[in-house]
Amino acid sequence: MTTNPPAGSGSTLITVAPTGAEADKSRHPALPVTLDELVDTARECEAAGASVIHVHIRDDEARPTLDLARLKNTVQALREATTLIVQLSTGGAVTDSFADRLAVLDAGPDGCSLTCGTVNFGDEVFMNPWPFIRDLYARTQQLGVVPEFELFDLGHVATLHRLLDELGAPYGGHVHCDLVMGVPGGMPGDAASLVGAVEALPAGATWSATGIGRTALPVMFAALSAGGHLRVGMEDTTSYARGRPVTGNAGLVERAAALAGLAQRPPMRPGQARVFLGVGDQH
Ligand code: KMH
Ligand code: ZN
């Protein structure tokens, strides 16, 4: 008897998360915080091998914001400048309200992040109670936005099963997850935790992984060896190695693309990624 390899296993989906809500522009000058900086970064990262961009935006003072008009402009500008799949964060910053996080979908992105549970987040708490998760998921189904399930802990995998059991398949029909590992308060960024989480995923689901801070490299190697996909970017790590600050998101994408190539699974291009993730053609 033969078994089919997992979908997309011949190539590697690379997502770039260039900004996030936590890193400080004054400490990290390469962090893209204006629309022009974000668009330039997106172009460079697409050329380097990314096919999805996970977007957080900042206001004029470089503080995180979920301002809807800004989000709409951002989606439009990224679509005009690149063929990347535009995935807006619905996680925002730990201080954002549930109402503002739900309203992100009104900016009309291709996809969105959808975190499957509450997690301690350093000294803060990233709140994702079940009613919010359920309402957000139902809205993605109504509005035709492809969710990516963000899993910071093993309990989040259990909630993903509950979500699919109670509300059915996501828009686009395919379940793709992102293991966010090494957050202080979430699952550790190591190979054993990665394998445990992957084994618990729903049948047929595909997954990416990202390691926060110094777990970036161990998680990347573990993900490639276990057949997964990659997320990289300054949202998750601001140094390449001890004493070597990141000088641009494209450098992180280049490193991921090179490792994916060594693993004989070269970067997936955006057109392939749209088919893989069940995201319609927006161009
Ligand atoms: N900034 C974190 C509190 C997401 O984008 O969906 C949440 C986060 C997850 O970054
Ligand atoms: Zn994010």
Image (cartoon, helix red, strand yellow):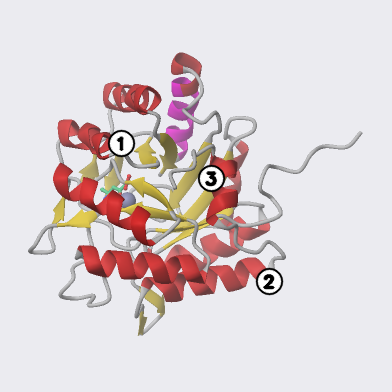
Residue 254 appears left or right of 88: right
Q: Label 2 neighbourhood size at 10 Å, few (<14), some (14-19), many (20+)?
A: few
Q: Earlier in the sequence, mark 1 or mark 3?
A: 1
Residue 175 appears left or right of 29: right
Q: Which mark identifies residue 262?
A: 2
Q: Label 1 neighbourhood size at 10 Å, few (<14), some (14-19), many (20+)?
A: some
Q: Earlier in the sequence, mark 2 or mark 3?
A: 2
State the image quarter where residue 132 is shown.
Answer: top left
Q: Earlier in the sequence, mark 1 or mark 2?
A: 1
Instruction: Give the structural element (helix, strand or loop) at label 3.
Output: helix
Q: Main secondary structure of the magenta part?
A: helix
Q: Is mark 3 within 8 Å of ligand 1?
A: no
Residue 160 on the magenta segment:
yes
Out of 11 and 231, give the one closest to the viewer: 11
Q: Which mark identifies residue 118?
A: 1
Q: Is mark 1 within 8 Å of ligand 1?
A: no
Give the magenta part as a residue range: 154-163
Residue 120, above or below 1: below
At horizontal 18% and vertical 68% (from top left) the residue drawn is: 24
Compute the Cα span from label 1 to label 3: 29 Å
Amino acid residing under circle 3 = Arg
Out of 228 and 125, give the one closest to the viewer: 228
Q: Nearer the viewer, mark 2 or mark 3?
A: 3
Residue 91 on the magenta segment:
no
User: x and y percent of residue 167 in the render?
Assistant: 44, 17
Q: Which mark identifies residue 189?
A: none
Compute the Cα span from label 1 to label 2: 36 Å
Compute the Cα span from label 2 to label 3: 24 Å
Q: Which residue is mark 3?
A: 274
Q: Nearer the viewer, mark 1 or mark 3?
A: 3
At horizontal 33% and vertical 71% (from top left) the residue drawn is: 238
Q: Would residue 271 be visible to someone looking at this image?
A: yes
